[in-house]
Image (cartoon, grey):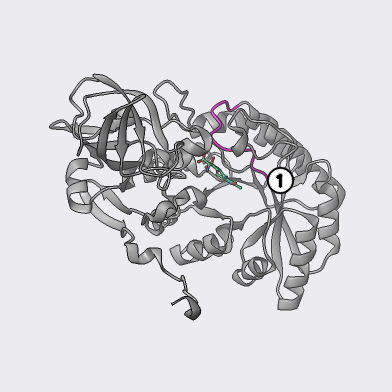
Amino acid sequence: MRASELGVIDGHLTIGGVDAVKLVERYRTPLYVTDENQVRERFRAFKDAFSGVKSEIYYAMKANGNLAILKILESEGAGVDVFSAGELYMALLAGFPREKILFNGNSKTDEELELAVEAGVTVSVDSLDELEALAQIAKRLGKRSSIAFRVNPDISPKTHPKISTGIRTSKFGIPHTEVMDAYRRAWELDGLDIKGIHCHIGSQILELGVFGEVMERMMNLVEEIKDELGIRLEFLDIGGGLGVAYREDDPAPTPHDLADVVLPVFKGRCKEAGVSPTLILEPGRYIVADSTVLLTRVNTVKRAYKNFVATDAGFNLLARPVLYGSYHRIVVANKMDLPPEETYTIVGPICESGDILGEDRRLPKIEKGDILAILDTGAYGFSMSSQYNQRPRCAEVLVSDGRVELIREEESVGDLMMRQRIPDRLL
Ligand code: LLP
């Protein structure tokens, strides 16, 4: 969240007009707090940026799959990218229209393909194996399946290697040099309707020039498919990936900046080729990242090798720092008007040395009981949480214009044993 958009009243952080300290008094810590207006604004910015062409915004639910957030985006007219049967189930539950659901995935089970065909959603096929399986399943069910192919465009964005997905060595998609064979094969098979083409080159991309290359490469294929097979694709989906400014001095590209790179190529090439596919974008992070803070209480302040501040949230609730070395700004929610005084390393309660949320941060003097807010945690925050160390997951609340609503109850220790069984012989 841009610091300017976070409020401060009487030295306390506010989010969506609500005092963070009051929130934790009512709901305890740790607590994820999401500002509804921010989610809506971010989505609208995306929609608006691409409104000059026939386009759809498919929210990537993996970023944040809370049902209330899905409902908000569905009400804004979003489509949705799903990556598993579970995500498909949630999308249908949230009421997304099936014609605006794209089922992605590099390792779908036959069962998942069957669900996709039954639900009538479009499948982004990731391999020739999958294509054959899907055709057989459609035949068995006596239904048709709409498909696209996920292309590996062999393009390298500047981002963390673990979230770069369109480079040659990536596990995702069919190499762009081979994907024509897949379209030819799909053309021969019964029961499949070839609708589109899809790629996704990676996440947290701040230098957008690369999306121009992606568009050129994808339009080459759109053209080839038209020329060779006579198919005018209904959609071209270039995935998500627009990054957000986690650090104060990160560049903060907007959806309009992305549109400025992508649309001239798209429009020019469509005109040249005589095609008019719908342009689909699949943002996840940009829509939800800066809508949310994670509030966590300080359990201990300890002067050891470093000045450690230990909180009640760790990588069980926010895995990004430990997984990718990600940076999230941290503020002291009950001391917003105090100047930085000391350098602290913020650590979680998990039994691993890597459980560090923020290193060497200049903050006001911190004491036991203070409330820290970890910013920009709406994307890949709760959605990647775990119960590691037998810690129940925390609650989530939604705030909007001063209103507060619980959108996920915190788990209890009882939930930890859910679905476990002790064999009788061990009782
Ligand atoms: N479409 C597909 C097919 C994807 O795989 C992804 C993200 C997206 C769209 C959305 O990308 P976004 O707009 O959010 O960048 N856990 C990592 C990010 C993993 C991204 C996975 N795929 C993190 O916390 O940075």
Query: Label 1's element?
Result: loop
From what the image shows, is residue 406 above or below residue 427?
A: above
From what the image shows, is residue 426 above or below residue 95?
A: below
Do we see residue 165 in this rendering?
yes
Q: Ligand 1 quadrant? A: top right
209 left or right, relative to 294: right
Of the residues shown, which amino acid type is indicated by label 1? Lys
Magenta segment main secondary structure: loop
* The residue stretch that appears in magenta: 199-208
Front one among 163 and 118: 163
Residue 422 at x, y = what percent?
A: 47, 74
Residue 21 at x, y = what percent?
A: 19, 42
Do we see residue 60 in this rendering?
no
Q: Residue 294 in magenta?
A: no
Q: Which residue is mark 1?
A: 171
The structure residue drawn at horizontal position 46% and vertical position 23%, both measured from the top left corner, is 250
167 left or right, relative to 296: right
Front one among 35 and 276: 35
